[in-house]
Image (cartoon, coloured by chain):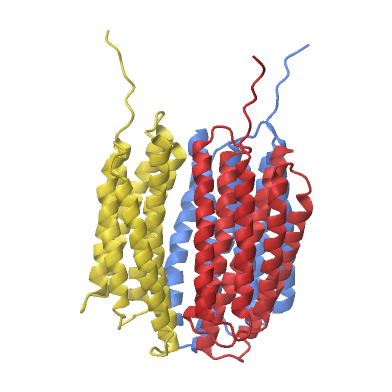
Chain colours: A yellow, B blue, C red
Amino acid sequence: MGLRFKPVDTSFYDLFTEAAQHLVVGADLLAEMLGEGADHADVARRMREAEHTADETTHALIKRVNSTFVTPFDREDIYALGSGLDDVMDLMDEAVDLILLYEVKILPPELSTQVEVLQRCAELTAAAMPNLRSMQSLEEYWIEVNRLENAGDKNHRRTLAKLFSGEFKTIEVLKLKDIVESLEGAIDAFEKVANIVEQIAVKES
Amino acid sequence: MGLRFKPVDTSFYDLFTEAAQHLVVGADLLAEMLGEGADHADVARRMREAEHTADETTHALIKRVNSTFVTPFDREDIYALGSGLDDVMDLMDEAVDLILLYEVKILPPELSTQVEVLQRCAELTAAAMPNLRSMQSLEEYWIEVNRLENAGDKNHRRTLAKLFSGEFKTIEVLKLKDIVESLEGAIDAFEKVANIVEQIAVKES
Amino acid sequence: MGLRFKPVDTSFYDLFTEAAQHLVVGADLLAEMLGEGADHADVARRMREAEHTADETTHALIKRVNSTFVTPFDREDIYALGSGLDDVMDLMDEAVDLILLYEVKILPPELSTQVEVLQRCAELTAAAMPNLRSMQSLEEYWIEVNRLENAGDKNHRRTLAKLFSGEFKTIEVLKLKDIVESLEGAIDAFEKVANIVEQIAVKES
């Protein structure tokens, strides 16, 4: 009888990659929502579906952590990364939902800039997840996401200043502020994911 | 000399049950606050007292965790459950406090629907806590709380749409939105408690 | 060969002290921002610098935890305390930033009362950090911060009642509410730091 190795469960990497790919879908739906003549109800319905699918991935991940003896890295880091990815989806879903709910007709162009940041963050995150296996080439990812978050923050502040410039009616300010803060929250959530990845990489190196 | 068993401290279950019973009191006070002709200042005073009593239970729980060698389940899960129950109380107290503070006279009926959800969640949680000892019959509890949270979320979105429908003055929207979000936060906090219980039950099974 | 002791790394205490001293600087800048005739853009620029310096201290702390084998107390408590101190700075920076961004000209005097609470909390925290080494004289610190948080909370509620009294235009209420909530958040964050210190002291005693 030969030696038997207890292999580390590799499906964790697949589930993280899957979770990040849902974020690419979510960010694209958010961009569609902001497009001219978009059918808000229809895009919101598809976003809700995407969010449910993402939830299933998160549950599969948690179930696997709870039932696996040897995890590829610390159990709490797997939880943190999984729920970090889930938070991004929730915040993007919230932004789409608020646009529908508040019946906002005119969306300032600054919002599109934020959604472009979100799309870029989603692509970078989806491309980085498979590298968790080798722990290679992750540094460029988290540096770039941090750079994008800084750019997003500057744009967020410009947007707030515009909202309060007197150009908008107060009730519109109240609506747009909620939406703008969801977008900012989603970008922050991407940065949080990148910070968790950095912490995992530092520990494992 | 016979065998000596080191008994697991059972008072944890009593303290969790006590904490959940405070939530039943809190949810009922919230319902009273929304009732016609309620004496807002008096209900708010009693809510503050209930919140202090709940705080004492939380402190007793934390003190016991720190001074007990063998806990019935993971120390961090006890912390999480204790502070989860405490968060619900804080958010219900916040809702009552804001109604008093903002001197809101007319409360849309949608708010009562949310408070009914909170009352039901509180009763379910108080009934479930003693079952932590046997880890039996907990599944129905967390499934039902999750269902209630979904219903609450739908009602929350309907309420927000109504607030922004043009029926209310902007300053009233600003006030009511804060109150409505406290209620939604309290329902979410009940769901979080149910999720913690689920995670404990999965680990222990 | 004599005995060799593996000394516990003492620089953790220095880094915590350094982090708390940044909070004294931050609270003072916030007070300056509220002063009559303050150059908002200039104070905000210096606040941003102070926040960056505080960030560097936090990073140094995290790096040290990750690279140190024997830490003076639980790794997760060091993280919690470090990020707790960091949160205070972020919220004070946010308050300053919002005053600049929203171009708020008239700040109600209640805000100055809150900033005085913040300055007092910062001084107490900076004075307490070096005592983590001996774990002596920490109790007065956390009791006093909890007392200050209670006073701050009462003042916060008075401020909100004033904002909604009808004295202010709705758009001003919207702006001031954000600023007032940042200040309240910063005071809460100081209380959280005090609670973490209490928990560490209880564990170590």
Q: Nearer the viewer, residue B26 or A144?
A: A144
Count of marks overlaid on the render: 0
**Viewer-proximal residue among B175 and A30:** A30
Please state the horizontal and vertical placement of residue B128, each as a whole percent of the image.
58, 47
B70 in relation to A42, above or below? above
* Percent coordinates x, y for residue C57 in the rendering: 54, 53
Question: Depth check: C53 or B186 in front?
Answer: C53
Residue located 58% across and 32% down the image: C70
Residue B107 rendering spot, x and y as whole percentages: 56, 81
Q: Please tell me which residue is depicted at 57% across the width and 68% down the height of the picture.
A: C92
Question: Is residue A91 in view from this perspective?
Answer: no
Q: Is residue C64 left or right of residue A158?
A: right
User: What residue is drawn where x is 63% and y is 88%?
Assistant: C165
Q: Residue furthest top?
A: A1
Outermost residue toward the left in this view: A37
Is residue A188 something one can see in this rendering?
yes
Q: Is residue C195 left or right of residue A194?
A: right
Looking at the rendered image, the quarter that the N terminus of chain B falls into is top right
Residue farthest toward the front in the current orientation of the protein = C1
From the top left corner, tell me how far across and down residue B188 is, in percent. 50, 60
B135 or A165: which is nearer to us?
Answer: A165
Task: Report which quarter residue C38 is drawn in.
Answer: bottom right
Q: Is residue A27 above or below residue B144?
A: below
Residue at (42, 67) in percent of width and height:
B154
